Image (cartoon, grey):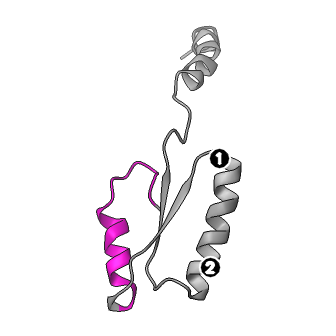
Amino acid sequence: MTPRRALPLLALMPGLARAQGAFPDRPIRFIVPFAAGGNSDVTARLFGARMAARLGQPVVVENRSGATGAIGTEAVIRARPDGYTL
């Protein structure tokens, strides 16, 4: 492709970025694979509060304890890959 043909295409690129919707537009799930009240839970809640303040959307911390963290890990694996589950 010659530079003369590439230049008009490059001019259209910022318009493509603006066409995307705002992220996030709904609450974010933060899954902790350990019991509530532990160090990982407290850390996740502090981190979630900071994320919520920055992103402008609530961050819901869910504790999915059991099987040495396998239940919470499986919940994240089975979640939709849309960026709203951590």
Residue 42 has which mark?
A: 2
Q: Position of residue 68 (x, y in %)?
A: 38, 91
The span picked out in magenta is 68-85
Magenta span main SS:
helix
Q: Which amino acid is tagged 2?
A: Val
Residue at point 59% right, 20% down? 13
Pick the front one: 65 or 77: 65
Residue at point 61% right, 70% down? 45
Look at the picture and state if 35 lies above or below 59. Answer: below
Q: Secondary structure at mark 2?
A: helix
Q: Secondary structure at mark 1?
A: helix
Pick the front one: 56 or 24: 56
Look at the picture and state if 21 lies above or below 45. Answer: above
Which quadrant of the view contains residue 62? bottom left
Comparing labels 1 and 2, the label whose residue is closer to the camera: 2
Task: Using a 10 Å C-alpha cutoff, classify the residue at mark 1 as few (fewer than 14 neighbours), some (14 to 19) or many (20 or more).
Answer: some
- In this view, the residue farthest toward the bottom is 68
Q: Is residue 16 left or right of residue 78?
A: right
Q: Which amino acid is tagged 1?
A: Leu
**Residue identified by numbered label 1:** 55
Residue at point 55% right, 39% down? 23
